[in-house]
Image: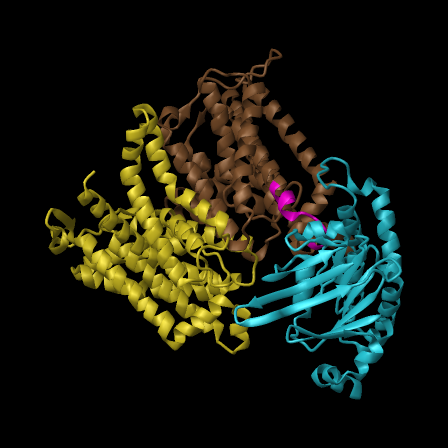
Amino acid sequence: MQATDQLFYVSFASRVMIYALAATSLNLVLGYGGMVSFGHAAFVGAGAYAASILMAEGVTSAWIAWPAAVAAAALLAWGIGAISLRTRGVYFIMITLAFAQMMFYLVNSMKAYGGDEGLSLPRRAEIGFGLDLGSEVVFYYAVLCILASMVFLLYRLINSRFGRVIVAIRENEARAEAIGLPVFRYQLACFVIAGAAGGLAGALLASHGKYVNPGVLHWAQSGTLMIMVILGGVGRLWGGVIGAAVLLCLEHLIADYPLGWLERLAPNYQQHGNLGVGLVLLAIVLFAPQGIAGLLSRRKAEAKRAPA
Amino acid sequence: MSWILILEQALNGLQFGLMLFLLAAGLTLVFGIMDMINLAHGSLYMLGAFLASTFVALTGSFTAGVLLALPATAILGMILETTILRTLYERDHLSQVLATFALILILNEAVRLVWGSDAALPMPAALSGPVELLPGLRYPAYRLVIIVVGLAVALLLYFLVAKTRIGMLVRAGASNREMALAMGVNIRWLFTAVFGAGAALCALAGAMLAPLFAVQVGMGENILILAFVVIVIGGIGSIRGALVGALVVGVVDTIGRAFLPILFGHFFQPRVASAAGPAIASVSIYLLMAVVLYFKPKGLFPARG
Amino acid sequence: MLRLEHLCKRFGGVVATDDVTLEVAAGEVHALIGPNGAGKTTLIGQICGGLAPDHGDVFFENRKITKIPQHARIAAGLARSYQITSIFRSFSVLDNLALAVQARTGSSFSFWKPVAKEKMIFDEALSVLEEIGLQEKKNHLASTLAHGEQRALEVGLALATQPKLVLLDEPMAGMGPEESSRMIELISRVRSRAAVLLVEHDMDAVFRLADRISVLVDGRLITTDVPEKIKLNEEVRRAYLGDELAA
């Protein structure tokens, strides 16, 4: 493989991991918390824009920009969550969607930071220690460290008191309240934590591509994240990671490796990739709602039960 | 800022609101009776517009084309309902969201395959001129027609829902599904019919708005979110709520976009005003929604108490 | 311990709670009986906080709790079980109880330490488990339990919060005779630690356990008295007991 090809794949891997982080953050609030938030892209976008605006204003240190992104996303999640979590069911889903769209329009009209054309950044963030994030390999390892730590933190969270409470609330909210748990507070905390993690993913995304535009907040992005979560496995530790990896790899394969036989069957099929995504998603929802992680664990369980 | 301009914008708001109502009415009943989130509702709006453009081209008549698009979309909607959507009623909301999101993707591409990315539906020549409503106030004839049609449909719906037996069944289903089932209402048939009617309403809105906005793939999604905001404000399951919500959203959005930047210009410095004005205008309805929800988490007129 | 004053609640045209004034003394088992649809569950909901009354007040240990949210009332010492079983089905039986213990013992804003390491929670959960007699099923998923066992878990969840007053909503619903007598024993053991407001249709259990009985008909409290007097009360027999006792 040529050097440029290698670099492409390293960069691609970084992108997959960033989306894995975003999808994992959604999995916390959606899979474990049972809160169907259709506006998660708003938090990813808030993080992306916070980091980008700081960069545009001359702040290049990741040690400032990335925590700022997390804080911005957390604050936004706190505001949106405080209002949205007073509602339930269909209301909640639509309200999170509407708020995210509101952020999209807000950002779209910020002419000072690119408006609908987006904002280009001169360089990636700096982390010091003589390491240059401009190098694809260095950036890859940085993202890998961050993703690994976040998944580990999620693992600890799920098994902690907070994790049990969140899952219990998802399971039976009325009874949770009736055994003395202040449901609203825990749900809001979960929402904020997930939003904050999403913001971190956003900051990494902006640094990776050295570019950010309002599209990152569009509800279609929220939809993509949800697809990743259900594909990988709702409420399972590696669900976000698996889903992001599978979806992005598939996307890449379809776009860059045309299949001759498919081309003859359906000319220009690559331009209608969304049709395939839609059909696969529909199939998953109807026939395999536990996602890939679910299928894997079911196979394992069945193998254990079957006589040797 | 003359009162003529205000009146004009108010009429625009009324027109937009009435079309939003057409979408919201079907949507709120789907949520209300079946407790199902249908993101693909906007796709029916899109299908209606595309079908209308074909029928208008085929028949050479705007009216005939639009009228033909209604049953065509209704049938497609009912097919969708009986095949795929029905399997989702008993599923959780997440599954409904994802499945109907998948439908959006599929339908968008399907339309692109059949028609291409956009289509044309020109305004009928007879209606393209202005009408003088009051001395000094000239308003486009076509938009007036939209208002008239919208009001007529709203009245028809009110009559149907409030005064007929079917309407009573629909309202019963919306306010208490289990009770309606227990009373022996054939919920499945009723629902397919309601869904088809909702699809026809979407098609009407799509076809009528087509000469004003572009007919393109993806047009359904933008207006869908507005329809959601309408229902959230108005209350799920309530046609009255949908109407009130739609009018409020239509007027606030239109007037907000028209006057907020000017208002801001009066009070703030030009640099702030030119940035903040349009930004606040575009999110004014979402702010409205947030305020309504803070005081009434189930909307203004929820069907279930 | 518990005092209801002029509680009123209507749903649209239906009056579910009609000017109810009632009190439960410390240490007593107070039964609430009445025909179906009398509003007993609605009353429990208003006491515990799931439902807000239109008028009237609820006092617990002489403190007005009418406007206090449900979770705070539980923290203050109230607990309820549900008429329609409401447990955490995907949790094991032990974990169900552990959750209730966890809710009682400090904040759950703890994100790092695994719950499994908190021995105290599980020890307490185990003792509740023994009390309700489900030791063998401790690691079974709650959804796999038989109906009677689920009802026992239902009561166990209420007890695990160590309440001062527990509201039991038809705990014996759908139970066979053996399970019922086990439940009766459980409730009589509970009375030493907590007052009980018992809603039940099983008259056998009611007359064996109750110190006082209140009768609710169409949302209205028609009388409160000791069991012997209730049996003889003409109005009560007409409204409700007549058929039950004759049977």
Residue at the image position 39 percent from the left and 40 percent from the top: B283
Residue A49 or residue C62, whichever sits in front: C62
Residue at the image position 14 percent from the left and 54 percent from the top: B127
Residue at the image position 50 percent from the left and 21 percent from the top: A4
Question: What is the x, y in percent for residue B106?
Answer: 42, 52
**Picture layout, residue A50 above or below residue C201:** above
Chain with yellow colouring? B
Chain A as rendered: colour: brown
User: In the picture provided, is B140 more to the left or to the right than B275?
Assistant: left
Query: Residue at the bottom extreme?
Result: C246
Question: What is the x, y in percent for residue C188?
Answer: 88, 66
**Picture layout, residue A279 above or below residue A228:** below
The colour scheme used to paint the residues is: by chain
Dominant SS of magenta comes to helix
Question: What is the x, y in percent for residue C27?
Answer: 85, 61
Q: Which residues are magenta?
A: A178-188
Magenta-span inclusion, residue A160: no
Q: Looking at the figure, which quarter contains the N terminus of chain C?
A: bottom right
Residue A266 or residue B140, whichever sits in front: B140
Residue C85 or residue B138, whichever sits in front: B138
Query: Residue at the top extreme?
Result: A130
Can I make out residue B263 in this image?
Answer: yes
**Picture layout, residue C53 above or below residue A197:** below
Chain C as rendered: colour: cyan
User: In the picture provided, is A34 more to the left or to the right than B85?
Assistant: right
Snapshot quadrant of residue A193: top right
Can I make out residue A308 in this image?
Answer: no
User: In the picture provided, is B44 more to the left or to the right than A78?
Assistant: left
Question: What is the x, y in percent for residue A29?
Answer: 60, 43
